[in-house]
Amino acid sequence: MRVLVVDDDPGLRQSLGLLLQGEGYQVTAEGSPTRALELAGAEAFDLILCDVRMAEMDGLEFLRRYQEARGQALVIMMSAYGGDDAAIAAMKQGAYDYLPKPFRSDEVLLTLRKAEERERLRGQVAALQAELSRWTDREVIAESPAMRRVMDLAARAAPHPSTVLITGDSGTGKEIVARAIHRMSPRREHRFVAVNCGAIPEALLESELFGHVRGAFTGASADKTGLFEEADEGTLLLDEIGDLPLMLQVKLLRVLQEREIRRVGDARPRRVDVRVIAATATDLEAAVRDGRFREDLYYRLNVLRIHIPPLRERPEDLDALVGALLERAMKRSGRRLTLAPEALAELRARRWPGNVRELENAIERAVVLSPDSVIRPEAFGSPLPHRVGAALGDVPRHAGETLARLKDAVEGAERSVIQQALAAAGGNRAQAAELLGISQRNLFYKLKKLGLG
C-alpha cells in the first residue's frame, strides 16, 4: 500500500517514514504541500497523511485542492492541537480520520489498518455497484458452488414433465427457482401460476385449486375456474405444500395420477395438462412419520428433488444479491443511493435466518429510511434475535422446577420472539411468518393461543 506523508517538519517525516516502511508500506514524504499535490496528481497513492498546520498551505486547503483534482486516496489529517477546529473542519470536508500529535506508533498503525480495511471494502462496493445492471436482469443469482448445483439440477429437470419438489428454509428463493424451471421448460410460452397452500383458509382452498360450479355452495353464484385449469399447458407451483390439509392431499394425489380435476359440485371430470412443482420449508419426511402428510403423495411429489441451502451456507452469493436487491429497491423508491463500505460489512456479518427475503426487506427498509444518499450500517437496525435461549431469560433449570413453570417459560419465549418478528415486519403478519420460518396459518394459531391476536 502506497502512503504519501505531507508535513513541513523534517523530523516527523523521517520518523513516520521509518515506522511505516518497517511495517511494509511504500512511503513517499514531502515537506511542500504544493509539490505533494503535484505528486498526488502524477502517482497513485492509497493513503495520504497530511499535517493540519503548515506555513506554505494549511491542511484544509490541501484537502480541498486534492478533492477538486478528484484524488481517490483516503486523507488522514495530523494535528498537534487535539480538538483543533481545522482538523474537525477537515473531517467534515471529507478527511477519513485524524491523528493527534504526538502520536504513538500503535495509534498510527491502527488508524492506517482501519483505513486499509475501508479502502478494501470501498473497492468491493464499487465493483458491486458496477455490476448492478447485469445482476438486475437475472432472476437467480448463483455465484456459490451450492447455488450453481441448484441451477444445474433445475436446468436438467426443466425439459421433462416430471413433478419437482423444491425444499429449503423460508425465504431462500424456492419460487424464483420454480419460475426459472418454467422459463427453461417447453411450457414457457404458457402460464406460470403460484399458490401458497398455507395462506388460503382450508374451506376455500379446494375451490381455489379445482374451481366450482354455480350453486355448489352458498355464495357460488357463478362457475369458477380453478388454478389447475388456469395453469393448463403451463406450470403450477404449490408453495408450502406441507400445509395442505389431508382431505385435499387425497384429491391432489388423484389429480397427479389421473391428470384430471373435478370442480366442486361438478359431476364430470376435466382433463388438465399441468406440470406441478411443489415447494416447502417443512420436513415432509417427519410429517409423513407423524401422520400429517400422506406417504403416497410424498413419493408422487418427490420425483425430482432440489434443495436450496440457506443464505448463511452460501456467503459467496451475498454481494451479488445485495447489488441486485439494492437496484430493485432504488427503482421502486425512485431514489439513488450508494452503499457505505461499513454497511456492506454489516450485511456480511449477519447470519440472515430469514434468508434472501429478510435481506431484501432490510435493504428496502434502508433505501426508504436513509436520511441522505448514503446507506450506513444504522439504516439496517438491530438484527432480530433468533436464539430461543436468548428469549428464555432466566428459565428454571434445576430438577425441582415444575413442568407448569417450564411451559410458562416456553410460552413466554415464544410470545417474545413472535412480538419481535411482528415489530420487525412492521405488523405485517405474512412477513412475520416468513421471518419466523412458519406458515401464516401456524402463526395465526399461535397468535390466538398466546392471546396476541
Image (cartoon, rainbow, N blue to C red):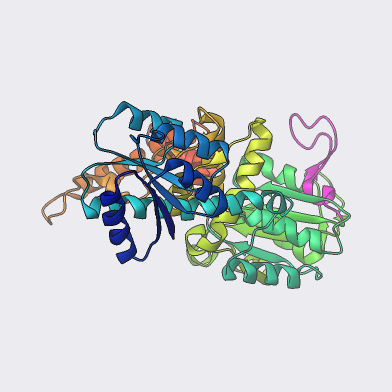
Q: Position of residue 139 (x, y in %)?
A: 70, 54
Number of marks drawn: 0
Res. 435 in view: yes
What residue do we see at 18% from left, 45% from top?
394
The prevailing secondary structure element of the residues shown in magenta is loop
What residue do we see at 47% from left, 53% from top?
46
Q: Position of residue 215 (x, y in %)?
A: 81, 34
Q: Position of residue 202 (x, y in %)?
A: 62, 43
Q: In terms of image quadrants, where is residue 204?
A: top right
Residue 228 is one of the magenta-drawn residues: yes
Q: Position of residue 123 (x, y in %)?
A: 53, 53
Q: Quick one: 267 or 144, which is closer to the camera? A: 144
Q: Quick one: 419 or 32, which is closer to the camera? A: 32
Q: Quadrant of the C terminus?
A: top left
Res. 109 in view: no
- In the image, is 392 to the left or to the right of 1? left
Residue 119 is one of the magenta-drawn residues: no
What residue do we see at 49% from left, 30% from top?
427
Q: Quadrant of the N terminus?
A: bottom left
Residue range highlighted in magenta: 211-232
